Amino acid sequence: MIRKFKSIKMTVSGVMMMKVTYRMIDKQLRLRGYMIDAVMSKSSEEKFIKFMHTVKKLTKGLKGKKADGMQTSEEWLTREDGTKLRICIYKPLHLKKAVPGVLWLHGGGYALGVPELYTARYRSLIEARNCVIVAPDYRLSIDAPYPAALDDSYAALLWMKKNAEKIGIRSDQLMVGGESAGGGLTAALTLYARDKNEVNIAFQMPLYPMMDDRSETESAKENNAPIWNARTNRWGWKLYLGDLYGGNVPAYAAAARATDYSNLPPTVTFVGDLEPFRDETVQYIQNLKEAGVPVDFEMYKGCYHGFDIANPTADVSKKAIPFFIRSFEHAVDHYFVEQK
């Protein structure tokens, strides 16, 4: 269901934009949001890029870390150029046979992050339904721009299909999900997989996806919300697109540019009403519905980008996370698609 929403509109040189005020933010999200923003916010693009490199160094030590309550392992795939792609695999302690396989693509504006940062998400999925999570440590934009991350994601997806029996998943229930940039990669990957026609995806979960580089929507223009705003969004896209930025960007890089939404997998997503990706998410869901794709969607009032991760104990997060999990459970029970 697509919900109606209200926002504060302002005009700058005739251009509609959204200005976020302190009182617009959910009371339980305010402090945590501005604390994180104090660390994330940078005054220039140069400082933003430097910060991304600093975070990469800080998270390097997390690689290979075991996760409590789950079996964890790694696989290494060889890319065409001879370099290696690390894949993290998370399984229940007591794995049943032939369970869904979930390819999870982590967030971080395409520029930061490692799979180990999102074990809480994997755990929530595994606890909801016995499943296996495959999380690729895809190349970040600070090291390699598009299509590096998409290529890595697709390689991991093909590996899942080929090794389904080996890792204990059923080949007719391959799912893809991710938050933020991972959500954008999810939406792009389902388009790419549909067009390549080599692997079928049963369900997708692009949570508050980063998928429109143009930043022309009301919610994206001059957005000053905590954690991710109009400036960081612009800088993130410039890093990810490289020389393509501002030019003819393909839908496989920015899924909001797609014109054909037919034959995409059933979808669940949610988004906050104060964040830059609000309008592009709403439009994406509308496009899927018009193409006949089953969708499950909620928008949450007073919420900035990634609010469910910033404060998972907030009342609104306790609504959003179970909503997403219930949709995943429904998908496990109802959505299957045979491989070619």
Image (spheres, grey):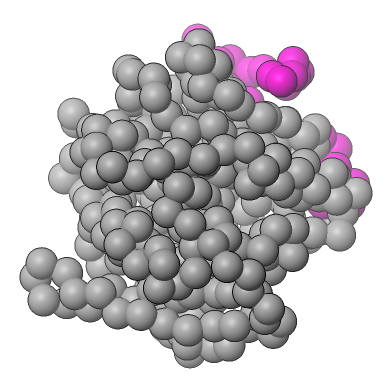
Is residue 71 or residue 49 the one in the foreground?
71
Q: Quadrant of residue 259?
A: top left
Q: Residue 217, percent across and down?
A: 50, 22
Is residue 304 rendered to the left or right of residue 85?
right
Residue 165 visible to an observer of this rendering: yes
Residue plotted at (33% across, 18% down):
260
Residue 327 rendering spot, x and y as whole percentages: 70, 40
Instruction: Judge left or right: residue 171 versus residue 34.
Output: left
x 54%, y 88%: residue: 65
Where is residue 242 drawn, in percent x and y? 21, 49
- In the rendered view, would you say 70 is above or below 101? below
Estimate the x, y position of residue 113 in percent, counting from the top left. 47, 68
User: Does residue 52 show up magenta in the picture?
Assistant: no
The one of 188 and 204 positioned closer to us in this rendering: 204
Camera-side residue: 152 or 17? Answer: 152
Q: Image point 67% across, 81% down: which residue?
A: 93
Q: Is residue 63 left or right of residue 141?
A: right
For the point 70% across and 40% down, which residue is it? 330
Name the quadrant of the N terminus: top right
Query: Which stretch did the figure color magenta?
Result: 1-30
Q: Residue furthest left?
A: 81
Magenta-span inclusion, residue 23: yes
For residue 198, side relative to residue 304 (left or right): left
Residue 232 appears in the rendering: no
Q: Is residue 255 above or below residue 42?
A: above
**Residue 338 occupies quadrant:** top left
Q: Where is 14 relative to 74, above or below?
A: above
